[in-house]
């Protein structure tokens, strides 16, 4: 069974990176909050990766989809933003480094079945 990841982001470079370097996983992209909620209601995902610009969706995900693991990605790390992300339900807050091994490490830790 393929690991399904929902990416909530609208940055083309990040989306292209995810699609090409995470090819072992099934990637679905939602460019905005409405599209993300629609995807979450219609399909099953093993992990959600949300850009820090979408922190407002985290509480909704935590309340409505409590089984979801969420990683927040950011270009410019900020301590207050990280605390806010964790308070709203994020499991990880990572820098968009565009390095495959950084993201894969987090995916493997949060979705154990991805190690296969």
Image (cartoon, rainbow, N blue to C red):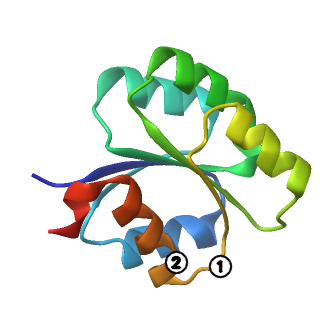
Residue at image point 50% right, 75% down: 17
Labels 1 & 2 near each other (Cβ < 8 A): yes
Above/below status of 113 relative to 47: below
Residue at image point 32% right, 39% down: 45
Residue at image point 29% right, 30% down: 43
**SS type, badge 1:** loop
Q: Which residue is mark 1?
A: 97
Label 2 neighbour load within 10 Å: few <14, some 14-19, many 20+: few
Identify the mark nearer the N-term, 1 or 2: 1
Q: Which residue is mark 2?
A: 102
Disc 1 from disc 2: Cα separation: 8 Å
Residue 66 on image: x %, y %: 45, 23
Residue at image point 69% right, 41% down: 86
Q: Is residue 107 left or right of residue 97?
A: left
**SS type, badge 2:** helix
Residue 57 on image: x %, y %: 65, 29
Q: Can you say which quadrant of the picture contains the C terminus? A: bottom left
Residue 54 on image: x %, y %: 71, 40
Q: Is residue 111 left or right of residue 66?
A: left
Q: Quadrant of residue 60?
A: top right
Q: Quick one: 13 or 110, which is closer to the camera?
A: 110
């Amino acid at each position: 069974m393929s690991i399904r990841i929902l990416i909530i982001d609208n940055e083309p470079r990040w989306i292209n990176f995810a699609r090409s370097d995470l090819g072992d996983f099934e990637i679905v992209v939602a460019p905005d909050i409405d599209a993300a909620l629609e995807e979450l209601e219609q399909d099953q995902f093993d992990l959600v990766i949300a850009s820090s610009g979408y922190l407002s969706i985290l509480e909704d995900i935590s309340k409505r989809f409590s089984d979801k693991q969420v990683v927040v990605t950011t270009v410019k790390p900020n301590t207050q933003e990280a605390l806010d992300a964790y308070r709203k339900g994020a499991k990880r807050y990572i820098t968009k480094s565009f390095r495959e091994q950084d993201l894969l490490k987090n995916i493997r830790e949060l979705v154990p079945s991805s190690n296969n």
